[in-house]
Image (cartoon, rainbow, N blue to C red):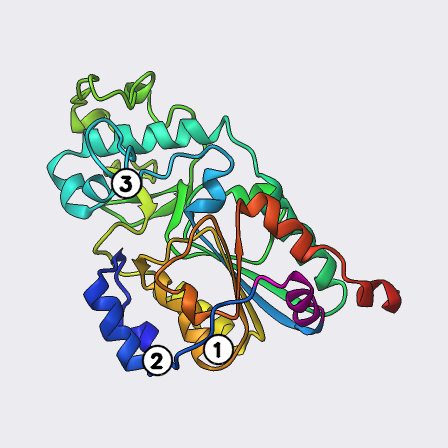
Amino acid sequence: MILRQFTCRALITSQLYARIKRQQHFKEMAQPSSDLAAFRKIFSEANSIAIITGAGVSAESGVPTFRGEGGYWRKWQAQQLATPEAFSRNPSRVWEFYHYRREVMRTKDPNPAHLAIAKCEERLSKQGRTVTIITQNIDELHHRAGSKNILEIHGSLFQTRCMSCGHEAANYKSPICAALEGKGAPDPKTDDAEIPVQYLPRCEQTGCHGLLRPAVVWFGETLDSDILTRAEQVLDSCDLCLVVGTSSVVYPAAMFAPQVAARGVPVAEFNMENTPATQRFKFHFHGPCGTTLPPALECHESEQSEK
């Protein structure tokens, strides 16, 4: 499967997308439809639904995406900070960046798109149907909305991993360590705190005290093989796929939905703009996900008749 050829997180280039497209032998397709009734009919008959979500969903909750014009923390974009090399060079700066993001999330809530997905999952599970969320987001808003069946392919802001012993654990402390209190301001004029490494978050396992890092998948790192395998299983077996708020420019996630479409399964994209993959999909619904998704996932009349 093509997914296994691209297991490291990276920004997809136009050249790479063209090469992948040739490998998949994509057929030319008509313009995707925006016929909600047609989508709803397919939705009513689907038993295994995969929902792939990206930064656009979180953006509607006011979460910074650090993408595109103006997408900077101080003077850096995420791909300049979210790397093993950046952490090795300046762990204080990288921890300031993640501390800022963790603290921001304490002020944000799930939006109507998150809630619609969670309600759909709960409702369909009672009918013996499955909904699996495959998310690139690390903010845990799907969890807070009530979703249960979630694959976080890029990890979580609220998990840490020890650089010495490898221990991973949930961590919701605010601040995560005393030295980061009041740090992390995104203003370009803010100077780095230059916190000595011994005062950065440390492992609390007995006898360790190693340096902690965020347990997220940085650019250039390999996705967790177990999560990737589970995602592949979902994508190989689903009979409907939704792509919600994702730019389709970070792989391997960028290839998930095209892989599903290539085997003839309907794919519906919900996004504020077209993406490099839009032409491969059966449906495209333009606009804020919090507006377009709830009516698409609400209880279908066929579900009412089965009660």
Magenta span of residues:
34-44
Which tag is nearer the camera, tag 3 or tag 2? Answer: 2
> In the image, is residue 169 above or below residue 4?
above
Q: Left of 304 or right of it: where is 90?
A: left
Q: Quadrant of the C terminus?
A: bottom right
- Percent across and percent down for residue 87 are 18, 40
Name the N-terminal-most of marks 3 and 1: 3
Q: Nearer the viewer, residue 100 or 34?
A: 34
Q: Residues within 10 Å of mark 2 (few under 14, many from 20)?
A: few
Give yes or no for contact between labels 1 and 2 (Cβ–Cβ under 8 Å).
yes
Q: Which disc number belongs to residue 1?
A: 2
| SS at badge 2 | loop
Q: Nearer the viewer, residue 299 or 197?
A: 299
> In the image, is residue 189 above or below residue 73?
above
Name the N-terminal-most of marks 3 and 2: 2
Q: Quadrant of the N terminus?
A: bottom left
Q: Is residue 201 visible?
A: no
Label 3 is placed on what type of residue?
A: Arg
Residue at 57% over, 58% down:
149
Residue at 58% over, 44% down:
290
Alpha carbon of mark 3 to alpha carbon of mark 2: how far?
32 Å
Q: Which residue is mark 3?
A: 213
Q: Which residue is mark 1?
A: 236
